[in-house]
Image (spheres, helix red, strand yellow):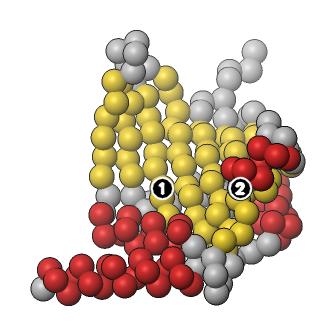
Amino acid sequence: MRHNFLITMVLAVLVSLAAAAPYAASHWISLAQGPWAGQAVQHDGSVSSMHFDVRMPPPDWLALPPGALIAAASTTRFNNRPGIFGRVEFAVPMSLDALKLFFNQTLSRQGLAVHDEGLGVLDARAAAVLGVSGVMTAADQKTGRSVQIQFREEEGWFRKSRQVQLGWRLEPAPVQK
């Protein structure tokens, strides 16, 4: 039984690498690994609690594009600071322009101010080496929601897909006086 499972996983990873992208292989590996959690002690003695699960949905205000294959998802909470921080990494068969339009529309509808940051802090040469093709940010100061989205270059042999790294925060909004 275990032998069949291992063969199935190896085949799934190889097909994912050949047909889509490395993120698709990560999806299958993360599913096989299952959810897990951990704690980290920071230099000041505070503790952060992390939860990792590829099946964990993003917050309801953060939509993912259709066809997104999640490779990694996590949330982090700190004991000395309010709020929750999360990450979702996924592959999707969409062009950069279509992805930017999708996030601009969906985040704007949720009340976040969206900004296209170009390549962010990278120059063209560094972005090419790192495979970064764009960065967007969005925030709503009233609700404490913010997100940073990093788009990667397309990958894959038979079916092109683009990797997207999305970091989000939900922190208590400052008290208005």
Q: Nearer the viewer, residue 67 or 171?
A: 67
Under circle 1, the secondary element is strand
Left or right relative to 119: residue 83 = left
Residue depicted at 45% across the width and 66% down the height: 26
The CA distance from mark 2 to mark 1 is: 21 Å
Say the numbered circle drawn on residue 131: 2
Q: Nearer the viewer, residue 146 or 137?
A: 137
Left or right relative to 65: residue 101 = right
Say the numbered circle drawn on residue 62: none
x then y, percent, for residue 128: 77, 53
Which quadrant of the structure image shows residue 155? Answer: bottom right
Which quadrant of the structure image shows residue 126? Answer: top right
Q: Mark 2 against mark 1, which lies toward the viewer?
A: 2
Q: Quadrant of the C terminus?
A: top right
Q: Nearer the viewer, residue 48 or 13?
A: 13
Residue depicted at 46% across the width and 50% down the height: 74
Q: Quadrant of the N terminus?
A: bottom left
Left or right relative to 4: residue 43 = right
Q: Residue furthest top?
A: 44
Which quadrant of the structure image shows residue 139? Answer: top right
Say the numbered circle drawn on residue 73: 1
Looking at numbered disc 1 in the image, what kind of residue is underneath it? Ala
Residue depicted at 31% across the width and 70% down the height: 32
Compare marks 2 and 1 and give the one earlier in the sequence. 1
Under circle 2, the secondary element is loop
Looking at numbered disc 2 in the image, what kind of residue is underneath it? Gly
Examine the rendering and report whether any part of residue 106 can be seen: no
